[in-house]
Image: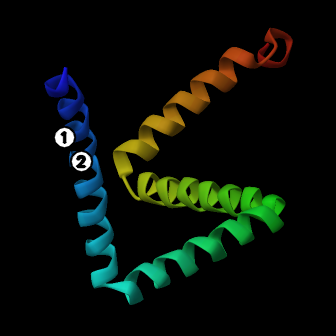
Amino acid sequence: MGHHQAAPMVALAKPKVLVEENFMQLKKDPEVVSEENRRLGEMLREVASNGESAVAASELIRRNLAEQMAMTLTRDPSFKAALVSALSGRILELSPTRDIN
């Protein structure tokens, strides 16, 4: 019975040692840790107080990305030709027949 009680104590001792080792690693560089915590705190405060502006910022990023993609594609002559062809074909499809006659 004494043997059964010793096994859990050994099992409990291992995680405690790991936690202590991790804590010692954190203590090695307190400036880095406090700087990361400060930045994280700032980010959380910004998100909490500026929920709307965070949405607006992500919308702006999305729009900028779309504009960059459009600029890259429109510089490609084969893309331009394919786009013009597709658009003109679609416009003819959508036009009422009475306008064509």
Relative depth, front residue between 55 and 25: 25
Residue 55 left/right relative to 25: right
Residue 95 - label: none
> Within the image, what quadrant is residue 100 found in?
top right
Relative depth, front residue between 78 and 26: 26
Q: For mark 1, what is the residue?
A: 10
Amino acid residing under circle 1: Val
Of all residues, the one furthest to the top in this rendering is 97
**Residue ID at (65%, 76%):** 42
Residue 18 left/right relative to 58: left
**Quarter that holds the C terminus:** top right
- In the image, residue 2 above or below residue 75: above
User: Label 1 near label 2: C-beta < 8 Å?
Assistant: yes
Residue 38 left/right relative to 82: right
The kind of secondary structure element at disc 2 is helix
Residue 13 - label: 2
Q: How many marks?
A: 2
Amino acid residing under circle 2: Ala
**Residue ID at (41%, 59%):** 75
Q: How is the image coloured?
A: rainbow
Of all residues, the one furthest to the bottom in this rendering is 31
